[in-house]
Image (cartoon, rainbow, N blue to C red):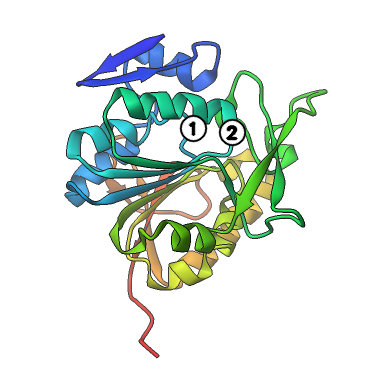
Amino acid sequence: MTVAWNGTRLLVDVNDHIGFQTYIRNEPFEMTVHAVARQLGLARGDVILDIGANIGTASIPICRELGCELAAVEASKDNAALLLRNISLNDVKARVDVVALCADTGADGFVKLHLRDGNRGANSLHAEWAATAGDTAFEWVPALTLDDYVNRSRIADRIRLIKIDVEGAELDVLRGGQGFLKTNTAPILMEYRIDAGDSTRDLLFQVLDGLCVDYEVHALDDRGNRQPFDRNTPYANVIFERRRLAAAA
């Protein structure tokens, strides 16, 4: 099925949660990237780094509208197939890498992506996140660290907004990007679903404690407006914004 919204066309799979919600609402499933990019005044040539891009509903519409470049990272081959078609439909300048970003890239450069049939947005590197009763489906995906990815793609100086939506693997992504994070000035958008379970809460607390050394954190409302943040409250989205840069050596 195709959804048309404000000049953007998105191919969706209505048998999958994100595709179905996009089709029923007749708008992109996730509008936070759209709202924040407009607030930041992003423009042609700026790069939006979308880690866990799924089929592109979060980032393709604003890249088409503002002329931004898209750096999309998506581990699932099924999601990536629709992501590529949606990029082509909307004439977006984009680089797409079908990889998982993590700290431990495996002995042979591959890691398991655990699959959630009917909700591919819940695919995760963590089995307990994606698994349903009796579900053991997975696929092997190539893995990189965030540092390796950024160095290879040569876009670090043009990244103006980062979205990380990796279903419980946020800490894995950030641990693999310590070099990049030392100089990064782009805001980072993330889910903060501490209500997803004890292990997820503990991981997100570690993310929070690590990033808040250099970043200020705010909750975001449905329109992307900044709100006071409480570490013990779950949020659909939070934003980390750089407070200071480490002194040059």
Q: Position of residue 177 (x, y in %)?
A: 52, 64
Residue at x 45%, y 67% (from the top left corner): 180
Q: Position of residue 219 (x, y in %)?
A: 38, 49
Q: Position of residue 234 (x, y in %)?
A: 51, 43
- The 10 Å Cα crowd at callout 1, few under 14, some 14 to 19, many 20 or more, is many
**Contact? badges 1 and 2 (CB < 8 Å):** yes
Mark number, residue 54: 1
Residue at x 79%, y 23% (from the top left corner): 133
Q: Quadrant location of residue 76?
A: top right
From the image, tell me which residue sits under label 2.
76
Q: Position of residue 247 (x, y in %)?
A: 36, 86
Q: Quadrant location of residue 145?
A: bottom right
Q: Locate residue 37 relative to residue 179 in the image: left or right.
A: left
Mark 1 residue type:
Asn
Mark 2 residue type:
Ser
Q: Locate residue 198 relative to residue 191 in the image: left or right.
A: right
Residue at x 40%, y 31% (from the top left corner): 56
